[in-house]
Image (cartoon, rainbow, N blue to C red):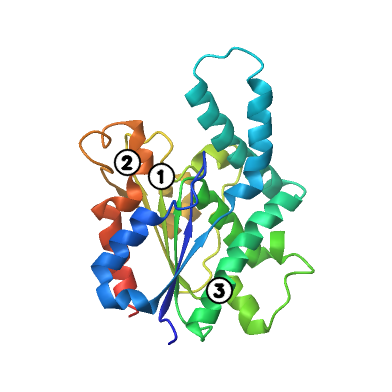
Amino acid sequence: MAKDIALITLHGMGDYKPDYYHGLKKKLSKSLGLDWSKVSFQPVQYQPILQKNQNEIWQRMNRFPLDGSLLRRFLLFGFSDAGSMEYSARSTISEQYKQVQQEIVKALDKAYTDLEDPSKPVIVIAQSLGCQVISNYLWDAHHGLGVFASPEPSGTDEVKAFRKLKTCVYLLTTGCNIPMFVAGLDPIEALPKPNETFMWENYFDRDDVLGWPLSPLSPSYENLVTDYEINAGGIFSSWTPWSHGKYWTDKQVINPLLTKIRQYL
């Protein structure tokens, strides 16, 4: 039976867990019940492309006695991800950058098969670095860059349009750190809307130093993105920087996402 809607997820920075989406999927499937069978759920797994080099660098650094190893590891794995992606986006496109985008293409191709109709809606939820990854992907799709530069992956015109997220109706970002990597640019331009119904909602916690509002970045971001401040996490994490990893199981994020999904079921 064909699915009614596709939900694409992108993980954030730092040490990678293949089941990063587990908490989100569990809450959505429980709330939707039988309707969950109508959702094509496709998690993007791009971190393995980047992590091999990071592991090697980390092992080399361990030759020296360094304090703060947990924080150092987080910063190395997290910000080398972001730095590599943003450097590639602003200069010569690297093979790694294209490989990351190809993982998004693979997820969308699976969704396309499940939906059996290229006009059906797509929702994307991205965390942390994943927000930057999907923003660059949508920018490149519109401008014929990255994986969409000639020659782009083969397929019919319908497939190519679907890969460019022309039917994406909702982008939900959490713990977004885009401002940390575009603040030095002038001008700062938001991505063009892939269609007229497209909405972008961004959720941040003021205690999450890696999560930022987006609308203050520039007039184009203000016109495109609606920011929501929430208190992510439970009693032991909501008031600390550890709230960065708690968005996807917080009802303040889950409930709006469920509302949007139900509109298309």
From the viewer's side, name the closer residue of 210 and 192.
210
Q: On the image, numbered disc 1 is attached to which residue?
A: 175
- Res 166 visible: no
Count neighbours of disc 3 (C-alpha within 10 A) and say few if under 14, some if 14 to 19, many if 20 or more.
some
Mark 3: which amino acid? Lys
Q: Residue at x 44, y 77 (%)?
A: 121
How far apart are the alpha carbons under marks 3 and 2?
Answer: 33 Å
From the viewer's side, name the closer residue of 220 and 114.
114
> Residue 14 appears at what percent x and percent y?
52, 39
From the viewer's side, name the closer residue of 220 and 50.
50
Count neighbours of disc 1 (C-alpha within 10 A) and say few if under 14, some if 14 to 19, many if 20 or more.
many
Q: Residue at x 36, y 36 (%)?
A: 208
> Residue 54 appears at what percent x and percent y?
64, 35
| Label drawn at residue 205 | 2
> Residue 171 appears at what percent x and percent y?
44, 62
The reply to whether discs 1 and 3 touch (Cβ–Cβ < 8 Å) is no
- Report the quarter where the N terminus lies: bottom left
**Marks 1, 3: nearer the viewer:** 3
> Residue 153 appears at what percent x and percent y?
72, 71
**Marks 3, 2: nearer the viewer:** 3
Q: Residue at x 27, y 42 (%)?
A: 233
Q: Is residue 111 above or below residue 87?
A: below
Regarding mark 1 in the picture, which secondary structure is present there? Answer: loop
How far apart are the alpha carbons under marks 1 and 3?
Answer: 27 Å
- Report the quarter where the C terminus lies: bottom left
Mark 1: which amino acid? Gly
Regarding mark 3 in the picture, which secondary structure is present there? Answer: helix
